[in-house]
Image (cartoon, rainbow, N blue to C red):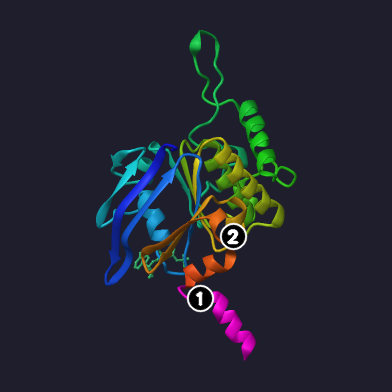
Amino acid sequence: MREEVLRLENLQKSFGSVHALRNASLTLREGEVVALLGDNGAGKSTLIKAISGMFPVDRGDIYVRGEKASIRSARDAMDLGIETIHQDTSLAPDLSIARNLFLGREPVTLKWLGVFAPLDRTVLREAARALLRRVGISKKLDADALVNTLSGGERQSIAISRAMQFAAKLIILDEPTNNLGVEETHGVLRFVKEVREAGHSVLLITHNIHHVFEVADRIVVMRRGEIVAERTVADTDLLTVESLILGVDVASLLKDTKAH
Ligand SMILES: Nc1ncnc2c1ncn2[C@@H]1O[C@H](COP(=O)(O)OP(=O)(O)OP(=O)(O)O)[C@@H](O)[C@H]1O
């Protein structure tokens, strides 16, 4: 069996009287794309915020590659190889696309005697162009353009490209194709597949079930803070997944609607 990348054991989180997470347990393995599904308010964002260090859980444990982890900040999560792209993702608006893609990890040139130059703009620009080509957004975007000149969808593509380029083990994508055009959406889905082939894992939150069937290996469904079902994509179908999300038998609902 493949190596375990992340294991959540009985996570609980309440906001006042709202139980956003109730004993949520989940395991993700190397090279696996898991789609986290659920209706509005099911607890998906709360779960990924707990994994990405945005707030602590009230109870429960998180294990990363078999070791119990204490994730108290986004930095802790990144140091453990977990990168999260949130819906309201933040880039540095006054810097270029190229700078944003490599923020904090700018390529350096090895000078003779082993001295590193602080930032090689030529290498940076070329690496940025190659990355934009891979995501399929190179036609429209110039690596030197400032991020504050981009649309919301374009910014999302840049943030996703950055995470996919650098994430060590696990990438969490929160509604990654929201606001994206057709070409950008295909670029992101293709990139998710590539990331899996390279042995990384992806936790994908989306309301688009068609995307789930295109890229995910496994589906995990949440309702009212609980994980209520897990299925491999190969062993399920659209109607079953919709029924699990809503907690009703969608097939018989459709039959009843036709009968009336
Ligand atoms: N900071 C907060 N303060 C109070 N309640 C919160 C907070 N964050 C989430 N909740 C509540 O916790 C529950 C789960 O919310 P969460 O955002 O995790 O759901 P979700 O599955 O991500 O929903 P959506 O698909 O609409 O984004 C909801 O009832 C929500 O109102």
Give how far across and how far down residue 154 sits, in percent.
64, 52
Give how far across and how far down residue 206 sits, in percent.
53, 59
The amino acid beneath tag 1 is Asp
* SS of the residue under disc 2: loop
Q: Is residue 117 visible?
A: yes
Q: How many marks?
A: 2
* SS of the residue under disc 1: loop
Range of magenta residues: 247-260
The amino acid beneath tag 2 is Asn
Which residue does the numbered mark 1 point to in the structure image? 249
Q: Residues within 10 Å of mark 1 (few under 14, many from 20)?
A: some
Nearer-the-camera pick, 101 or 244: 244
Q: Quadrant of residue 70?
A: top left
Which residue does the numbered mark 2 point to in the structure image? 178
Q: Residues within 10 Å of mark 2 (few under 14, many from 20)?
A: some
Q: Is residue 152 visible?
A: no
Looking at the image, is mark 2 or mark 1 nearer the viewer?
1
Q: Are marks 2 and 1 in contact (CB under 8 Å)?
A: no
Q: Quadrant of ligand 1?
A: bottom left
Is residue 124 toward the left or the right of residue 202 in the image? right
- Tell me: residue 239, above or below residue 219: below
Give how far across and how far down residue 90 sits, in percent.
50, 51
Q: Quadrant of the N terminus?
A: top left
